[in-house]
Amino acid sequence: MGRLVMKFGETSVATAERIEAVAAIVASRAERRPIVVVSAVGVSVPGEAKITDQLEAMAELAHAHKPYQENLDKIRVKHEKVLKELGLSWELIGPVWTKLRNALSDLDRPYEEYLDDVFSFGERLSSHIVAEVMNAKGTPAVCVDVDELDIITDENFQDATVTPENEGRILGRFRTEEKVLVVPGFAGHTADGRVTTLGRGGSDYTAALVGAALEAGEIQIWTDVSGMRSADPRLVPDAERLDVISFDEAKALAAFGARVLHPKTIEPAMRKNIPVVILNSFRPGDEGTTIRAEHIKQNKVIKAIAHKKGIEMLSIESTSMLGASGYMARIFNIFAKYGIDIEMMATTEVSISMTINNNKNLDKAVEELKEFANVTLEPGQTVICIVGEGMRHTPGVSGRVFSTLGTAGVNVEMITQGGSEINITFLVDDKDADRAIKALYYACIS
Ligand code: ADP
Ligand code: ASP
Ligand code: MG
């Protein structure tokens, strides 16, 4: 059957009671020698800021030599409360807390490096707590900190990636550990030991990396919903659970906003052909969603919709030069130089429109583009992606989609079809997005 990787998101470890529930879920699968990946302790009171957000705010202050003691106290109080409710002492996380304080005072390094070091501590604290609760409940467990995990990433701080060559080293000497290994999600380090983080929500990716490295039998993503739904449940509460979807379908849904899965999770799992199963830690008996390799035959041509709001559309226009050889190359060289990921793109004779994934350096790229083209940025857009393996062989899907949107009075800005032909992606104005998604859901999926 292979070993199990079990990742618990922050809602699954938000309170003492939830952490105890996690320990019970892991204990019930102990015979599969699980490796447990955890997120930071989650929000337990409405309105409370996420630990990872609090760490970011604190890093920003500290690096700018502004007072941050109040921020640090808040994070300490939160952890003290969870420890107290669990009957555990502060000593358990004392050494990690000291590392956090040391990281905070190590100011003499670029902010992006400093931030990742501080950023990583939510998971580095929670993993010790989860391991200790397992021990207390009779499941021998051991927690391993980031510096010992050999999750060696590139140097793209805040959104680091592990290359397949480095994947084989992950967990190193801990692979043969007999106890349940509890691993902090979200973090890795560069080859020379500087801490990196894998992108917000990146603990899912940690689980996939660990799974791929160990050639695990299954990667389980435990969260607060019973699997992937055919639309965002906050928008379409009656959207049904998808029983099985393919890696390609999951990849498209995650890339275009189905937050339940981090987009980088699929690649390592797919390469090693390891099923990823999304499960609900609040309802461990529920069935979830299995993501696996086979193309699944289903009656429905369109299986699901994902969306991402607040996207900026970038348009580059030139009346004379677009067709000229070298012009496109010039544009893409600028994107490559600044490491900008293009997500969707459409071209006409005189213009290129696109949406951009990572925009850390967008301003600089736009400045350079403006030297030879008209550039406009249009914020307030929503990317909508409809997904289904059945679309590969079914003509007329886009006709149905766009006539549904027309009837709903939604204006569509940009349309692209994914290379694998299992998704159609388009852009609408933020204000039309909810209407568009509901109309599509009821006309094409439900
Ligand atoms: P975790 O903290 O466990 O990583 P996330 O908040 O990242 O949890 O992901 C779970 C959330 O994803 C759900 O609570 C749900 O609101 C949201 N979500 C968005 N799209 C979907 C979808 N298609 N199916 C299920 N959940 C979705
Ligand atoms: N704690 C990190 C975040 O909030 C990673 C995660 O939860 O997956 O983004
Ligand atoms: Mg998540």
Image (cartoon, grey):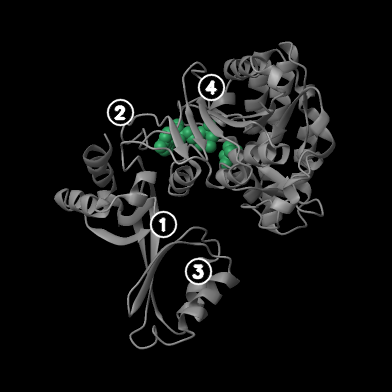
* Residue at (56, 44) in percent of width and height: 266
Numbered disc in front, either 2 or 3: 2
* Residue at (22, 57) in percent of width and height: 411
Mark 3, residue position: 363
Mark 2, residue position: 238
Instruction: Give the mark count.
Output: 4
Q: CA separation, marks 4 and 2?
A: 20 Å
Q: Residue furthest left?
A: 407
The image shows residue 214 at horizontal and vertical percentages of 72, 37
Q: Earlier in the sequence, mark 3 or mark 1?
A: 3
Q: Earlier in the sequence, mark 1 or mark 4?
A: 4
The image shows residue 22 at horizontal and vertical percentages of 61, 19
Give the numbered dot on residue 418: 1
Q: Is residue 49 left or right of residue 239?
A: right
Q: Earlier in the sequence, mark 4 or mark 2?
A: 2
Circles 1 and 4: CB distance less than 8 Å?
A: no
Amino acid residing under circle 4: Ser
The image shows residue 304 at horizontal and vertical percentages of 36, 40
Mark 4, residue position: 281
The quadrant holding residue 108 is: bottom right
* Residue at (38, 51) in percent of width and height: 423
